[in-house]
């Protein structure tokens, strides 16, 4: 206090003015950051919700479990889902501190068109993202049509009849993606949390080189991931990884659920689950543009 009182009046005024300007600049930056984050979320959510929001799952659950729709609705309300919806405050906060491709992927996001076509929707997202499509996006029919043509000249890589009845296994997903990106499609089946963390860090921390991008598609069991005890196997892209909280953002294409954060432990268990159609563990397909 004595030091400031002994300062010349002009210096004291200068210090006061400097402090005032610093405070004003700090407030301005804070306001700008707040507005930027608000704009960011409006943009991301507008991209994601270009497509219809998720449907009421109770009719489907009622059929699956052979119960009434009212009983299914009650079951849903009593279910404790451990995943974190991206639309919640906590879900948004987790994106801000995550390694993320969410903005880029939100441009090409869409929900699957039929009950068993999660893999086809995920392939369409992958192709559009890696080929940097900005306007007319690929449809599931485009994907099926591509494989109808290729099957005329060789063995069928993707059997539309099987997919529409049973969906696809991890190996089928990888073979289909390899038709578009033959030199850079790889299956990953992490066995430990360390393996999973290494895969995610390599994916999200590796910068684009010469314009090359990559996508990770996840084949997992939704029940083990905490999205509801009535769901089964599923495929969706991974959009972000928050190493601080230990969660992965699944950009869910299923018509009855929203994109959500899943803990590493639960995602590992969900991808280690054996697919009854293949007899093998589920896992990930990483695809890099040519």
Image (cartoon, rainbow, N blue to C red):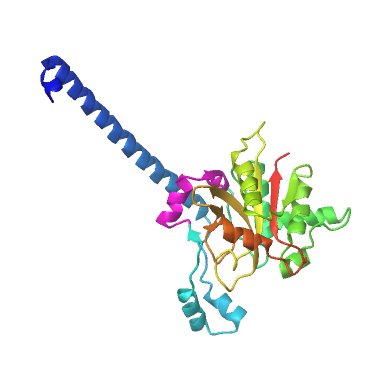
**Camera-nearest residue between 24 and 161:** 24
The quadrant holding residue 157 is bottom right
Q: Position of residue 116 (x, y in %)?
A: 67, 66
Q: Position of residue 86 (x, y in %)?
A: 48, 56
The answer to whether residue 46 is magenta is no
Q: Quadrant of the N terminus?
A: top left
Q: Name the residue nearer the viewer: 163 or 133.
A: 163
Q: Between residue 213 and residue 42, name the one nearer to us.
A: 213
Q: Is residue 88 magenta?
A: yes
The relative height of residue 122 versus residue 64 in the rendered view (above or below) is above
Residue located at (68% from left, 47% from top): 127
Q: Along the horizontal axis of the image, is 156 left or right of 80?
A: right
Magenta region: 86-107
Examine the rendering and report whether any part of residue 252 can be seen: no
Q: Is residue 213 above or below residue 284?
A: above
Which quarter of the figure is the C terminus placed in?
Answer: top right
Query: Relative to residue 200, is residue 158 depicted above or below?
Result: below
Identify which residue is drawn at 47% across, 79% down. Answer: 74
Residue 221 seen anywhere in this rendered image of the structure: yes
The mark tally for this picture is: 0
Question: Outermost residue toward the front?
Answer: 2
Foreground pick, 130 / 233: 233
Residue plotted at (64% across, 51% down): 196
Horizontal and vertical percent position of residue 232: 64, 69
Left or right position of 233 against 107: right
């Amino acid at each position: 206090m004595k030091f400031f009182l002994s300062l010349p009046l002009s210096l004291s005024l200068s210090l006061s003015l400097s402090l005032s300007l610093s405070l004003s600049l700090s407030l301005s930056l804070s306001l700008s950051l707040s507005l930027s984050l608000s704009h960011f979320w409006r943009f991301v959510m507008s991209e994601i919700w270009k497509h219809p929001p998720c449907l009421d799952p109770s009719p489907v659950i009622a059929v699956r479990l052979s119960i009434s729709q009212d009983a299914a609705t009650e079951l849903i309300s009593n279910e404790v889902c451990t995943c974190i919806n991206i639309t919640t405050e906590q879900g948004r906060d987790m994106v801000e501190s995550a390694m993320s491709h969410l903005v880029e992927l939100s441009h090409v996001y869409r929900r699957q068109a039929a009950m068993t076509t999660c893999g086809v929707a995920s392939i369409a997202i992958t192709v559009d993202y890696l080929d940097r499509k900005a306007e007319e996006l690929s449809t599931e029919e485009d994907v099926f049509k591509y494989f109808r043509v290729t099957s005329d000249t060789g063995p069928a890589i993707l059997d539309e009849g099987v997919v529409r009845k049973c969906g696809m296994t991890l190996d089928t997903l990888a073979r289909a993606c390899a038709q578009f990106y033959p030199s850079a499609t790889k299956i990953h089946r992490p066995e430990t949390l360390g393996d999973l963390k290494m895969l995610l860090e390599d994916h999200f921390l590796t910068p684009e080189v010469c314009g090359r991008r990559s996508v990770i598609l996840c084949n997992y069991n939704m029940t083990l991931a905490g999205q509801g005890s009535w769901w089964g196997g599923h495929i969706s892209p991974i959009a972000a990884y928050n190493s601080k909280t230990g969660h992965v953002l699944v950009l869910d294409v299923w018509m009855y659920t929203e994109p959500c954060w899943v803990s590493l432990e639960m995602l590992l268990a969900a991808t280690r689950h054996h697919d009854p159609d293949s007899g093998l563990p589920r896992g990930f397909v990483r695809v890099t543009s040519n």
